[in-house]
Image (tube, rainbow, N blue to C red):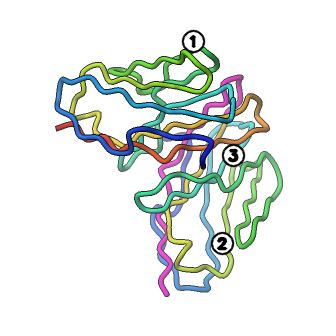
Amino acid sequence: DAGITQSPRHKVTETGTPVTLRCHQTENHRYMYWYRQDPGHGLRLIHYSYGVKDTDKGEVSDGYSVSRSKTEDFLLTLESATSSQTSVYFCAISDQGIGYGYTFGSGTRLTVV
Amino acid sequence: KNEVEQSPQNLTAQEGEFITINCSYSVGISALHWLQQHPGGGIVSLFMLSSGKKKHGRLIATINIQEKHSSLHITASHPRDSAVYICAVNYGGATNKLIFGTGTLLAVQP
């Protein structure tokens, strides 16, 4: 959907380097999420945001940090990439309230070599 | 142990068959989502439901809150339905976080 875009779509990086993934939305939704998807696991929450400058950890947050300085953008940073962070990363947005669904980005395939 | 269990993990069907994918969860929820992911593709939301039944084209989703169980049905299946189908639940709270099942890989053969 045009309402949410992720960049880059693919990235190969070396162990120990910092990496930043970007999620951009045009829907003005309050909630934004970063998930990772690995074989044998469901999508797992890394970090989420419930407003500008308001973020919190998910279940697999170690080694990751996030920032949200504007409603539209939610950045995920791997401070020092490791091979265990090779994964597909999905950003998602949701409007507040249980009555609103999720919209997912197209994903970023990250390979750490 | 994943709080959201899907079955089967893999499913192969012939074109035209009626397909059922099941999802069970452990505690009360506020809403349940069914999602579709084509190989190498993004994730698309199919349904969000908190009670009863929803229908969209050949897809039907049902939920039984008392039994903590949901099903996704595909009628008159087609090869283009081949994808991973993912169940996710929202246990409530202000942040709208989801817990995901591991998905069901469906292959519909012509």
Is residue B104 found inside the magenta-colored segment of the image? yes
Q: Amino acid at mark 3?
A: Leu
> Mark 1 packing: few (<14 Cα in 10 Å), some, or many (20+)?
some
Judged from this view, the residue extending furthest toward the top is A53
Gap between marks 2 and 3, in whole Å?
17 Å
Magenta extent: B91-110
Pointer 2 and pointer 1 on the same chain: no
Gap between marks 2 and 1, in whole Å?
42 Å
Residue B39 placed where, x, y %? 42, 62
Which residue bears the numbered disc 3?
Answer: B32
Q: Chain of mark 1?
A: A
Q: How many marks?
A: 3
Which residue bears the numbered disc 1?
Answer: A53
Tell me the quarter of the picture where residue A64 sits: top left
Q: Amino acid at mark 2?
A: Ile
Q: Nearer the viewer, residue A17 or B75?
A: A17
Q: Chain of mark 3?
A: B
In the displayed structure, would residue A10 be above or below residue A14?
Answer: below
Answer left or right for A95 relative to A70.
right
Which residue bears the numbered disc 2?
Answer: B74
Answer left or right for A79 relative to A59.
left
